[in-house]
Image (spheres, rainbow, N blue to C red):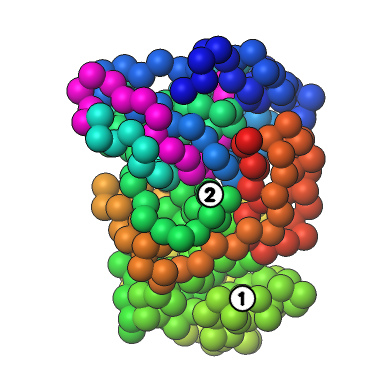
Amino acid sequence: MNVTNKMSGVLLNGHGGPEMLEYRKNLAIPEPGPQDVVIRVRAAAVNNTDVNTRLAWYSKGDAEADDATWSGKPLEFPRIQGADVCGEIVAVGDDVDPKRIGERVNIEPCIREVDGTKLDIAWYFGSECDGGFAQYTKVAARHAYRVESNMSDVELASFPCSYSTAENMLTRAKVGKSDIVLVTGASGGVGSAAVQLAQARGATVYAITSPIKAETLTQLGALRTLTRDANLVQELGNGSVDVVIDLVAGAGWPALLDVLRQGGRYAVAGAIGGPMVELDLRTLYLKDLSFFGCTVLEPEVFGNLIKRIEAEQIKPLVAETHHLKDISKAQKSFGEKGYVGKIVLNIP
């Protein structure tokens, strides 16, 4: 480890704009508890949760409300954010096998153990506790998954949050090879992951995206692409889809239920088009639909994702890379949505 016991990293000093992010070179390197590992972070990706947490988007009240994280736990400042991490284990706690030192790992972003304590409500790495926007981070050893791959650190950092979210939605909705799956927001990190992962399960995938990104989604495995303003009932037909994987919500939301078949399944993990939707309860109960709100990962999800990475069943989609100190620029680019896949920070 760094013999100076100091590291570079980015602090979030409060809710607000990019001005709340501060790049520092004199942060303390975390020390492992008995069941922890310390990881030298090589790359960390940007995602919606980092931005939403900074903006207090999760709060249903004002920006200072106690529910300004997705778990409802008050955010403590300063905080090192960063949920998407690839790095190398450089130190372990007393209860962890020292042979793990040197392993290249991805960190499971949805964590159930912190400082030796089992959590009743899962936390998000980099939100309720410090994360990976720094040269070093620590996490319970159970959440650091060894990954054997020829991919670069940047490529591996593009997987944890988006792909585990997508895999969790598909797991909760029990997507299989006989299913027709409609993915909204398909060009984003989670959406493009869902297209790949559903295709890897043998499902038929329809993707909603902008025309300029349609070809990329087809290459990822979408049998058909639709524009964001498409009339889904006219294009697909009533009752034509088995599963909807929704990351958008917004004004057009009712049509997603119209195209679901009798007994269809709807899974949601985002609302970038607007969180308030209009639900006709008759559609829900007369069609016997099942709804799945997806945040906390099922126990098997991240391990299954690592297996798919190692088997090369999915591929990384890195749109841009930036230096850690340029995090504000990276998040600005992230917000403009002019890309497919992930934006990743190099951490030298």
> Is any atom of residue 172 visible in this view?
no
Q: Quadrant of residue 326?
A: top right
Q: Is residue 242 magenta?
A: no
Q: Quadrant of residue 104?
A: top left
Q: Quadrant of residue 124?
A: top left
Where residue 67 is drawn, which disc sits there? none
Dot 2 corresponds to which residue?
Answer: 153
- The mark nearer the N terminus, 2 or 1, is 2
For the residue pair 30 and 206, the one nearer the viewer reads as 30
Q: Residues within 10 Å of mark 1 (few under 14, many from 20)?
A: many
> Is any atom of residue 273 visible in this view?
yes
Q: Quadrant of the C terminus?
A: top right
Q: Is residue 83 magenta?
A: yes
* Residue drawn at 71 percent across, 39 percent down: 323
- Which region is colored magenta? 79-97
Determine the CA span between mark 2 and mark 1.
Answer: 24 Å
Q: In front: mark 2 or mark 1?
A: 2
Q: Where is residue 312 drawn, in percent x and y?
A: 41, 69
Q: Are marks 2 and 1 in contact (CB under 8 Å)?
A: no
Three-letter amino acid code of the residue under disc 2: Asp
For the residue pair 56 and 17, the one nearer the viewer reads as 17
Dot 1 corresponds to which residue?
Answer: 217
Q: Where is residue 22 drawn, in percent x and y?
A: 72, 21
Three-letter amino acid code of the residue under disc 1: Leu
Up/down of 44 relative to 312, above or below: above
* Residue drawn at 33 percent across, 84 percent down: 178
